[in-house]
Image (cartoon, rainbow, N blue to C red):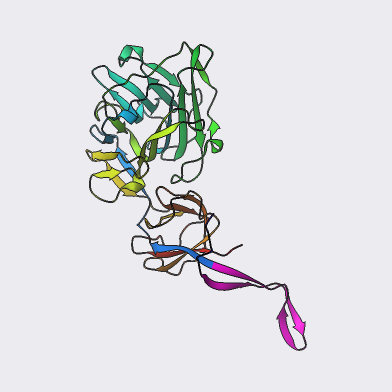
Amino acid sequence: MLNRQNISPLYRDVTRGRGGIAGGKFLFVNDSDVTSYIVNSGTARGTVTYLSLAGASGDYASTPDSAALDITGDISFIFYIAPTLAVPETAKEIITKSKFGNQRSYYVQINPYGGLRIGTSPDGIDATIINVDSNVILPISNGQGIWALAIRDVNNGAGGNDTKFYTSSGSPFVVPSFAEFTQLGTTDVVAGTTSIFNGTANLEVGSSDGGITNNFSGKIYRAQVYDGIFGAGGTLVADFNANDWTSGATLVSSSTAETYTLNGTATIQGASGVNAIRLATTASSTNDVYNNMAIVLTGGTGSGQNHQRITDYDGVSKVAVLSGAWITEPDSTSVYQIVDRDY
């Protein structure tokens, strides 16, 4: 919650009740004053964005291997994707740490049937990879976006290892909580416990083997890796977020600090027609802190729009999701105010 003690009232809104004639004058009854506060203001940082991949060899984003990425136990992947084909002709990589030369660690992909697949190897060798597919396909059509969660529990406590897949709806700009995901199909149980190879491959978004295998075609908005089980104590160790991009061929994760390089013809593109805005870097870093507050554009592109209410807020990327579409979409010239009307 925001502390209003040091915030001066902006203005007073008068909420009008029902009216009637009394003594020759029209009077409102049940009037109430509502004090409004500006809780944040600034210049927006342009449109929200995504990684655009054409599916060609060499097109991907990558970050170097690091100790944090060398996960050997339970692992979770969270991502928002909009694949060109919901049922691709071949598997399409989403997040991988896997390369030729006995450097297979882990990956998650769309399989050729339109479902999800996790693969992990205990020793880096192709022949020992444990591949598990979801037994239900993703509920999307070509070009449609979706949140997905994939979890491998390497030791389920009963002599096996479990793989679970989940999906969630909602804006691509705010990562859902675990409670907002719904399991996709049923849990897959494989006999025997396992582990994940501590390899030296880079982490890739949209490909494997240094950008030449199973190249993704479509849009990737967010791709996260957790050391452990998401929702049960897992630690975020990698967070590719297209909204961290400013310019050039690299972006630095604002949550986990690794640097991603855009390779080949991979680009960061602006998402049009979305009900969201990227706030200034001075905005709060607390998730959901502006929820149910109003946002008003007071200058620049779209100035004068005041019909929006914030329904979700990501404190890392500073992206506010709104109750409806813009009449004129804001850009990097748009000046805004977030107003708490104390309702």
Q: Is residue 100 above or below residue 264?
A: above
**201 in the magenta segment:** no
Q: Is residue 113 visible?
A: no
> Is 324 left, or right, of 88 in this rendering?
right
**Residue 172 at x, y = what percent?**
44, 44
Q: Decide which of 218, 263 is in the foreground and name it.
A: 263
**Towards the viewer: 18 or 104:** 104
Quarter of the rendering containing residue 60: top left
How far from the left and from the top, in percent, is residue 145?
44, 40
What residue is drawn where x is 43% and y is 46%?
173
| Quadrant location of the C terminus in the rendered image | bottom right
Q: In this view of the protein, can residue 163 be seen by the observer?
A: yes
In the rendered image, residue 295, in percent from the top left (x then y), is placed at 48, 62
In this orientation, which residue lies closer to the viewer: 47 or 225?
225
The residue that appears at 42% across and 14% down in the rendered structure is 194
Which quarter of the figure has residue 93? top left
Q: Quadrant of the N terminus?
A: bottom right
Q: Is residue 13 found inside the magenta-colored segment of the image?
A: yes
Q: Residue at x 50, y 34 (%)?
A: 167
- Magenta-colored segment: predominant secondary structure: strand
Query: Which span is picked out in magenta?
Result: 8-36
Res 22 → quadrant? bottom right
Identity of the residue furthest to the front in this view: 5
| Count of residue discs | 0
The residue positioned farthest toward the right in the image shown: 23
- The residue depicted at 51 percent of the width and 33 percent of the height is 231
Q: Position of residue 78 (x, y in %)?
A: 43, 34
- 243 in relation to 19, above or below: above
